[in-house]
Amino acid sequence: MIEGGSVILPIVLAIMIIIIVMLFFTFIPVGLWITAFFSGVKIKILTLMGMRLRRVAPGRIVNPMIKATKAGLDLDVDELEAHYLAGGNVNTLIDALIAAQRAEIPLDFDRAAAIDLAGRNVLEAVQVSVNPKVIETPQIAAVSKDGIEVIIKARVTVRANIERLVGGAGEETIIARVGEGIVTTVGSSNNHKDVLENPDSISKTILSKGLDSGTAFEILSIDIADVDIGRNIGARLQMDQAEADKRIAEAKAEERRAMAVAKEQEMKAEVVAMRSKVVEAEAEVPLALATALRDGKLGVMDYYNMENVLADTDMRNSISKITDDDKKGK
């Protein structure tokens, strides 16, 4: 039993040593330290151990540091680790610094880190600063003074302004301002033909306004890609105005007609009332005559004379009516 135990003990010790060594090399990236050492990056083993304890992947810091050192950049490991812990992309940051150095663009680590933490792609910004970018606007409709709609599409060549990347407006603002400049320029033109003949006047007018102020870009040129003629907005507005005036006139005429009908109905009612009064008065005439005859205020001859006058009046009215009918027949 003693001999068996003496054989198992060294095996157990050997396994424990192997496990400890494996844990050591897993926790402490010795291979990464050796790579950094032969690449000219001076970093301590304890620093790598501290990264592990701070839950920082050492490779995310050391490999970009090696790249920066080979490119001739003098950076501090603590700055890269702080940028990583802040949520930045260390690898993209180093690539941007290297690209800016090769292109002789003044860009220090603090500004590049601020741009990256602001949510902008710092490497893309450096690339756009070296190789300008073309922004194509959508079709923008504007109306000249003669009422003709002009549809314009423009291409804006911009270059990133490194100094204004933090806090500067983006591409949407550039497109909006260019669209505003197009609408203003076309709207101030007396004739749409002037716009068709001189489209470069739009570019000159827009560039003179300094539309890139407060943005993260510098406008290099504005080229008019396409100019089309749209609708006759002026004629359409005049037609709409004429239609509106027509409806207003019809409404007023209908109002006057309704008032006339109401007045006519009122007059008819008055005539009916007068006729009823006449009928009532005529109904009282025989009674009045009888009373006058009975009281001796009216003689029989007077009554007959009155009847003759009435008969003569009726005859004259009949003759006059016949004469009018003959004239109308002719």
Image (tube, rainbow, N blue to C red):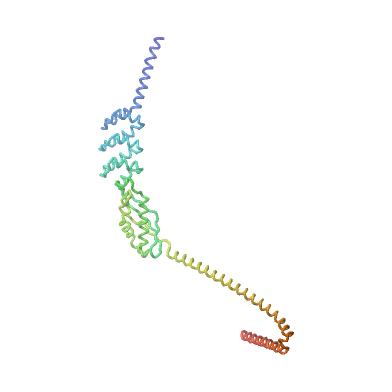
Q: Is residue 214 above or below residue 101?
A: below
Name the image quarter holding residue 7. Answer: top left
* Count of picture labels: 0
Q: Position of residue 254 (x, y in %)?
A: 54, 69
The location of residue 290, given as percent across then percent down, is: 73, 83
**Residue that extends furthest to the right in the rendered view of this protein:** 294
Q: Quadrant of the C terminus?
A: bottom right
Depth check, front residue: 36 or 189: 189
Image quadrant in which you'd find residue 150: bottom left
Please state the horizontal and vertical placement of residue 282, each as a whole percent of the image: 69, 80
Task: Residue at the far front: name it.
Answer: 295
User: Residue at the spot x=37%, y=19% of the render?
Assistant: 16
Q: Is residue 183 above or below residue 329?
A: above
Which quadrant of the structure image shows residue 39? top left
Q: What residue is drawn where x is 54% and y is 69%?
A: 255
Residue 14 horizontal/vertical position (percent): 36, 18
Q: Name the one closer to the observer, 47 or 66.
A: 47
**Up-down relation of residue 285 to residue 47 (above or below):** below
154 lies above or below 87 = below
Which quadrant: the N terminus? top left
Q: Residue at x 27, y 43 (%)?
A: 107
